Image (cartoon, coloured by chain):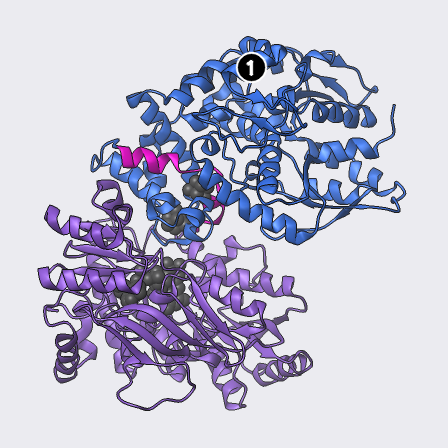
Chain colours: A purple, B blue
């Protein structure tokens, strides 16, 4: 419980309407998509950088932990108030401040929802490519803090590739700016990149300067069914070896297809054991040629069937297969552990084989799909928590999946971050020495360890 | 009716993904987790676990729901938030008593005779609920405080309730089905012209129409207020009225009534099942009976009105989106244009807009902007409640469009008999 004088001080900063210690509000800000629950002491809705700065000064002086929060759609518990304290939500800071069409730069507040931003720039013929599957509800602040990625990353890169500069409130309450609206800039250390993916542990992002691209004229979607995951993986390599970088290269493994089969009206033949959804974008006349070229390249690789969408509606129907995955998984088992390992592109089939072996060893279904183009595999370990021993088995399986990915030169997380969910496994991937440097940075910025403590590193 | 506890499994199906944040109109206006489905489901769970009591904030959050069902339609796990919220409201009413407005709803709706008497005396009604502006400009009526905002546009009260102006039985042609017309309160007391249009359309097809005089309100406003007993009482009365004479279908021209009789009643027990199953929306019925083709065969008017369509939540969430558009687009005097956000809630939400008029207006403002962007001069829909809210929203935005029922446009197009 926070002292009344602290609550009062917070009310003075943001107005009493924007501070709450009501049980109902504490419950509403106690969870995220990891489904774990920790009650905060107070929820604060600041409206400006200045207010965030004053909150941080207060929290730092009083040693109160602060947990930044966007939409609470994170999969690793980054926004969870694991130590009580203050949940600081950016929901009110949702303004697009500027879209500079001449310089292809935009400036936004952190609480802007990603899709709302995409639509705003697309209206003027510009393009913000990062597209996490949560784009309809997650915030740009949360995207930057997690360095979110999505299907289009294979061609366009991840969130950090579009962040030119930031305004950040440090854990001690200072307001700093990093980078700026220029395409180039090499003065000093690159704090922008440091902040991207720092999971709200190094500072609170209060303003974001974003690089934009011209909006591609059109896109073309194709769905290819393969008789094996190897065929699909070889197809990915072959396409890229032919110097074509599609916008997306999404794959689903055999188990995923089995789940989806009942959930979609599209017919998927039994022989299909892997699916690739390939999308290319660019000038309209060039797309047909490129789609044909791709079909030729992959034809010898165990293709069962190729479907090419001719209209946006047909394209949408093809994507529907991918979109129905998440809901259809629950038919396998009620509880899901969603890990998002990433391996070098060519190692995807090997990794899938390893995962299949792990699934067999522990006798629990594991369903894989993801972004083949960048080797990012969403590993879904499906269990029923109510069945005794399942949870323990799942935990063991997860650890083996991580070890498998690392052994293939991969990483434990391509996009969801560490948060609390993967913190116990950090020593598997990051050496003690590297971790010590990371912790030194944290210490320098947050001497009292009040900003999002307990995240990424267990002892932080 | 189902208790909050009966929804435990559904409540626990929420995986807290946050997807509903993109679709909840209340959250769109209020940007607060307590306002979105995920928050309400979390609170419902906390109530079941005894982690929170029915304190002011909890009541406030549960009151902040339009019961529009948009969240459920988009939820990967199909968590029925609107049902959960309605169950929570019943629990609240059970433990805390009805709110004073809820009491008013129960008192008036529970006694159709009272409602008729009030409507007939016209002026007398105004002393209870609202007052006509002296000049009575057709649409502008004034609600007195404390519940109703002076700025609100409302239709005038019908001089005579619709059901009192028509016979109970209007025979059709041999071999055509018999339809019981469930008029609902909106048509009966405020939009009798829609009722007349309904009859005209069915007569055009040769359908026999039954309009039982003793039918009551469908009960949806009572569901929204948590007035469980009133819902049950109204349902029982309607069951009797609608089954007294044999009808092949019960047809509604109000989305809320369609959900009330066609969906909510199904929860009340077996005896309601066949009634619920027989219930059809007017445009689904008309489309099934070949009206789209018949309209398409009519010569197109030279000067056509640009008309857009608003999806009432209670039809959209029941999967009825195609037929109203088909009929509208087939009308000879209509040039149909689709607007952006046709499927988002207008912001009425039954009693919601009475408690939360400011938020309701904000939600309506988005709709008004979409209507304006579409360039339509008319916004047609299939629910009297939506018509009222759409007109109010357009007026606040100083827009030009008029809100109408598709049936009114249909009646214009059909030959006089
Ligand atoms: C259905 C679903 C699909 C998803 N798909 C993807 C996907 O395809 N790709 C992907 O990368 N992720 C995905 N995610 C995960 C999640 O949506 C992303 O991590 C997203 O970036 C989180 O944004 P948020 O606004 O919800 O942030 P939150 O969950 O609220 O917070 C995430 C982290 O960011 C920090 N944070 C938030 N705002 C700020 C700020 N202003 N300053 C500093 N730190 C801040 C928090 O402290 C926390 O550590 C998905 C999640 C769901 C539920
Ligand atoms: S979309 Fe459904 S599962 Fe996801 S948070 Fe909302 S109610 Fe829960
Ligand atoms: S029913 Fe409508 S208003 Fe209520 S929580 Fe769901 S989306 Fe929001």
Q: Nearer the viewer, residue B412 or A458?
A: B412
Image quadrant where residue B79 sits: top left
Q: Dot 1 corresponds to which residue?
A: B125
Q: Which residue is drawn at 35% across and 48% down?
A: B32
Report whether A187 appears left or right of B282. Answer: left
Report whether A148 appears left or right of A311. Answer: left
Classify 10 Å Cα crowding around label 1: few (below 14), some (14-19), many (20 and above). Answer: some
Image quadrant where residue A318 sits: bottom right
Where in the figure is residue B259, as x and y percent of width and height? 55, 31
Where in the figure is residue A33, as x and y percent of width and height? 32, 56
- In the rendered image of this protein, does residue A203 appear above or below residue B256? below
Is residue A31 visible in the rendered image? The answer is yes
Q: Main secondary structure of the magenta part?
A: helix
- The magenta span reads B56-76
Label 1 resides on the chain identified as B
Q: Residue at x 48, y 28 (%)?
A: B148
Report whether B89 appears left or right of B170. Answer: left
- In the rendered image of this protein, does residue B368 appear above or below residue B155? below
Is residue A1 visible in the rendered image? The answer is no
Q: Does the residue labelled 1 lie within 8 Å of ligand 3?
A: no
Q: Nearer the viewer, residue B156 or B168?
A: B156
- In the rendered image of this protein, does residue A87 appear above or below residue B302? below
Q: Name the residue at the front extreme.
A: B134
**Does residue B311 show up magenta in the picture?**
no
- In the rendered image of this protein, does residue B406 appear above or below residue B71? above
**Does residue B73 show up magenta in the picture?**
yes
Q: Which residue is drawn at 51% across and 11% down?
A: B111
């Amino acid at each position: 419980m926070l002292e009344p004088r602290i609550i009062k001080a917070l009310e003075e900063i943001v107005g009493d309407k924007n501070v709450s210690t009501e049980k109902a509000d504490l419950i509403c800000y106690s969870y995220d998509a990891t489904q774990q629950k920790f009650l905060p002491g107070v929820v604060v809705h600041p409206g400006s950088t200045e207010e965030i700065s004053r909150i941080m000064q207060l929290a730092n002086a009083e040693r109160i932990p602060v947990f930044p929060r966007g939409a609470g759609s994170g999969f690793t518990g980054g926004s969870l108030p694991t130590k009580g304290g203050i949940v600081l939500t950016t929901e009110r800071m949702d303004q697009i401040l500027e879209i500079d069409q001449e310089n292809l730069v935009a400036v936004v507040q952190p609480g802007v929802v990603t899709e709302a931003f995409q639509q705003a720039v697309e209206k003027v013929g510009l393009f913000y490519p990062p597209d996490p599957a949560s784009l309809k509800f997650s915030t740009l602040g949360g995207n930057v803090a997690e360095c979110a990625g999505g299907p289009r990353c294979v061609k366009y890169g991840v969130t950090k590739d579009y962040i030119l500069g930031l305004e950040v409130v440090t854990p001690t309450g200072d307001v700093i700016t990093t980078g700026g609206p220029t395409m180039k800039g090499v003065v000093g250390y690159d704090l922008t990149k440091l902040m991207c993916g720092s999971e709200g542990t190094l500072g609170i992002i209060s303003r974001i300067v974003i690089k934009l691209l011209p909006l591609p004229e059109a896109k073309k979607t194709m769905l290819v069914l393969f008789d094996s995951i190897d065929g699909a993986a070889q197809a990915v390599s072959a396409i890229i070896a032919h110097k074509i970088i599609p916008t997306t290269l999404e794959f689903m493994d055999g188990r995923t297809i089995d789940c989806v089969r009942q959930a979609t009206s599209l017919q998927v033949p039994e022989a299909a054991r892997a699916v690739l959804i390939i999308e290319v974008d660019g000038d309209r006349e060039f797309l047909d040629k490129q789609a044909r070229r791709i079909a030729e390249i992959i034809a010898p690789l165990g293709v069962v069937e190729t479907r090419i969408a001719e209209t946006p509606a047909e394209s949408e129907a093809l994507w529907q297969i991918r979109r129905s995955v998440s809901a259809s998984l629950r038919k396998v088992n009620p509880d899901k552990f969603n890990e998002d390992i990433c391996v070098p592109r060519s190692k995807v089939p090997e990794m899938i084989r390893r995962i299949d072996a792990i699934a067999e060893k522990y006798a629990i279904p594991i369903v894989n799909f993801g972004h083949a183009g960048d080797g990012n595999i969403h590993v879904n370990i499906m269990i029923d928590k109510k069945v005794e021993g399942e949870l323990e088995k799942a935990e063991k399986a997860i650890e083996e999946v991580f070890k498998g990915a690392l052994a293939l030169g991969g990483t434990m997380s391509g996009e969801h971050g560490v948060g609390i969910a993967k913190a116990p496994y950090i020593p598997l991937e990051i050496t003690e020495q590297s971790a010590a440097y990371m912790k030194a940075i944290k210490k320098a910025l947050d001497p009292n360890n009040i900003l999002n403590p307990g995240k990424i590193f267990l002892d932080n | 009716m189902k208790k909050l506890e009966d929804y435990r499994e559904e409540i626990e199906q929420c995986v807290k993904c946050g997807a509903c944040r993109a679709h909840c109109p209340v959250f769109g206006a209020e940007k607060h987790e307590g306002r979105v489905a995920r928050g309400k489901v979390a609170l419902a769970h906390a109530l079941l676990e005894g982690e929170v009591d029915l304190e002011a904030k909890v009541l406030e959050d549960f009151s902040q729901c339009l019961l529009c069902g948009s969240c459920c339609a988009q939820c990967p796990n199909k968590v029925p938030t609107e049902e959960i919220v309605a169950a929570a409201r019943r629990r609240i009413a059970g433990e805390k008593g009805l709110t004073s407005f809820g009491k008013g709803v129960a008192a008036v709706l529970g006694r159709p005779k009272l409602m008729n008497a009030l409507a007939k005396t016209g002026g007398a009604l105004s002393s209870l609920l609202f007052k006509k502006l002296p000049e009575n400009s057709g649409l502008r009526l004034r609600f007195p405080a404390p519940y109703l905002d002076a700025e609100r546009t409302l239709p005038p009260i019908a001089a005579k309730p619709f059901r009192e102006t028509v016979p109970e039985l209007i025979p059709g042609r041999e071999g055509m089905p018999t339809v019981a017309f469930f008029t609902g309160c909106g048509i009966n007391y405020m939009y009798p012209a829609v009722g007349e249009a309904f009859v005209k359309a069915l007569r055009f097809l040769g359908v026999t129409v039954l309009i039982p005089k003793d039918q009551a309100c469908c009960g949806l406003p009572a569901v929204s207020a948590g007035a469980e007993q009133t819902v049950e009482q109204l349902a029982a009365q309607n069951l009797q009225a609608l089954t007294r004479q044999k009808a092949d279908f019960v047809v509604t021209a109000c989305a809320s009534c369609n959900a009330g009789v066609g969906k909510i009643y199904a929860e009340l027990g077996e005896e309601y099942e066949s009634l619920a199953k027989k219930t059809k929306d007017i445009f689904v019925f008309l489309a099934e009976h070949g009206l789209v083709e018949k309209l398409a065969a009519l010569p197109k008017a030279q000067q056509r009105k640009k008309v857009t369509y608003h999806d009432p939540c209670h039809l959209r969430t029941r999967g009825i989106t195609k037929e109203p558009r088909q009929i509208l687009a087939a009308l000879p005097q209509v040039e149909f244009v689709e607007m952006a956000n046709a499927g988002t809630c207008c912001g009425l939400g039954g009693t919601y807009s009475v408690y939360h008029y400011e938020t309701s207006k904000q939600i309506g403002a988005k709709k008004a902007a979409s209507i304006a962007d579409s360039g339509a001069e008319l916004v047609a829909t299939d629910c009297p409640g939506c018509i009222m809210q759409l007109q109010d929203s357009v007026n606040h935005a100083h827009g030009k469009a008029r809100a109408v029922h598709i049936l009114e446009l249909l009646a214009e197009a059909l030959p006089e008999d």
